[in-house]
Amino acid sequence: MRAQTDLLLGLKAAADFEGRAVAALTHLLDTVDATLRMGDWPGARLLRAMVHLRRGGGYAGAWVLEAGAEGLAPPRGEEQLLPSATAWRAMAETGRPVVLDVALRTVTGVDGQSETVRWSDPRSTPLPEASQVRLQAREATHITLLPLIDPEGARGAISIEVRCRAAIGTPFVWPACLDALEIAAALAGPWLLDPRMALGSVDRPLPDRGLPVIGPTMAPIAQLVEVFAAEDETLLIRGETGTGKSRLARWCHGRSRRHGGPFVVLDLLAVPDQTRTGELFGWRRGAFTGAMRDHEGAVSRAEGGTLFIDEVDKLSLEAQAMLLRLLEEKVYRPLGDDGAARAADVRFIVGTNIDLGQAVREGRFRADLLYRIDVLPVALPPLRERRDEIADWARFMLDRLADERGSAPQALAEATARALKGRPWPGNLRQLDNVLRRAAALARMDGPPATLEPRHLQRAEGLSSVGGGDALGGLEEGLDGLLQAVDRLEAPPAVDWPGGLHGLLLARAVRYTGDRDRAFTLLGRGDVVANRNHNRTLKREWAKALALLDALGQSPGDRTPPG
């Protein structure tokens, strides 16, 4: 009890995340060390402890405290990777600790009951051979992974690594101290997972052509992707359309051991519904009507390399089951192939711009597939949350455009850089690139020196079909046109005109974002989404919009609610 009180006092006294993490990890290492000293474990050596945090659907960071050190360090290279994605998955499924015997390649779940530890599954889960090799390279023989959970549902873990070759094949020290470790992790969880706590600085990976801009916001994400690159586990990248998921996936491939192999992108949104399964797995002639010849799928083309499956949620439930088998067993069959299953030597990265958890609740995505891919998740922030990068991305895009044209690069005026930072960029990097290409063309019309000035940016945005800088002015013009149309009616019907306008705005937001949840959140109605009333609300508001359109004699075409 005294030790737990000291831990809480240390957590409370810490002024920042690093102080809290050091207090928690030091306590845990001391607990294991004291237990080792009381037992007969010849050659046992305490190595290190690590904190792994998730926020916003992705990893937020990983930090290492070496035994005897006074401060944290980020993981570096293959000697300090996450213990095992398999171990994380086993822990997440139960919310309880797991222990690893590296030499025997076992990951075992445990149940703590007061003073005893019961091995819940003597068969255990096999540790991948690649994980074993990495863990042996950093001398670890026994590891435990402790869950971190707070009342808000944020998740993380603490891992502790020990070397003791004499204890290989035995429960080792864990039965004697795991209850105390789990209690300490439970006490530290809310302090380490506090969303208000800044996570501190990390060393930034060096930018390159693949990821040319890495600002303070993206630095911890890029640092983690560098760590994940050495894993062969599936990487899940969440992010809005245009945030750069494909670029980040390619960057990860370039830092992996598969960098010499192919990098294949399958954007399911660009593939017709009826051929998505075939584009992924391939097909044999005659597999379906129109299959006139064999077709090599993305899995086959990516052999020996990396396959990035973007918009994975667009797969049918049947195709999701086939993908699950591929991820778990590394085998597949092209459509119409009755022969033996093919082995796949492929690393998978999947991307999505929706909440897959919500898709599971709505029956559109398999829960077992989500569990399988949600091991190394990365949440890619939208550009509006990476304003520290906007000006640098703009300069990179202008330099790239100059390379494409074979001309001198255009300069970016400081006033233009400030204006770019002030825009919301709902289309993210893709929208920024499109606007800059138009602005660059307008600037060239002025002749050299072709510096991008704010006037070029404003004109380029005015040419956009998405909307530009003077959005309010365009809205006012549209409202004037609506009022003139109503004024021309001989007897304006009793229509809820403001309600109809709201319905039109909401429908437009759904089409703009491509997602009902995000449309409501964009318009400040996140409470409706949280209460799960947004589908009913959309239907009601769309009925008002239809009444307005009918009064004006206009047809929306499809009269069903958008999205």
Image (cartoon, rainbow, N blue to C red):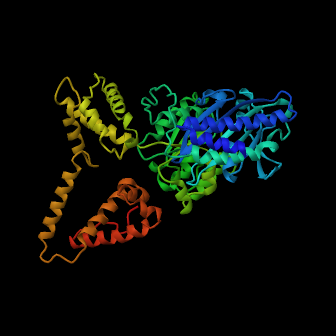
Task: Please tell me how many numbered marks the rendered image carries.
Answer: 0
- Locate residue 324 relative to residue 122 in the image: left or right: left
Residue 394 picture location, percent across and down: 33, 32
Q: Is residue 546 positioned above or below 510 on the image? A: below
Q: Which residue is drawn at 66% across and 41% down?
A: 6
Q: Which residue is drawn at 38% across and 57% down?
A: 519
- Out of 271 and 182, give the one closest to the viewer: 182
- Out of 216 and 551, give the one closest to the viewer: 216
- Locate residue 417 relative to residue 393 in the image: left or right: left
- Locate residue 310 relative to residue 476 in the image: left or right: right
Q: Can residue 190 be seen in this view?
A: yes
Q: Can residue 315 be seen in this view?
A: no
Q: Look at the image and tell me in which quarter the C terminus lies.
A: bottom left
Residue 195 picture location, percent across and down: 51, 46
Q: Which residue is drawn at 71% across and 35% down?
A: 29
Residue 334 picture location, percent across and down: 62, 48
- Locate residue 395 relative to residue 53 in the image: left or right: left
Residue 161 picture location, percent across and down: 72, 34
- Out of 36 and 480, give the one closest to the viewer: 36
Q: Which residue is drawn at 60% across and 27% down?
A: 76
Q: Is residue 425 positioned above or below 93 on the image? A: above
Of all residues shown, which one is farthest toward the top? 408
Q: Is residue 313 positioned above or below 70 on the image? A: below
Q: Is residue 374 positioned above or below 480 on the image? A: above
Where, by quadrant of the figure, is residue 528 drawn? bottom left
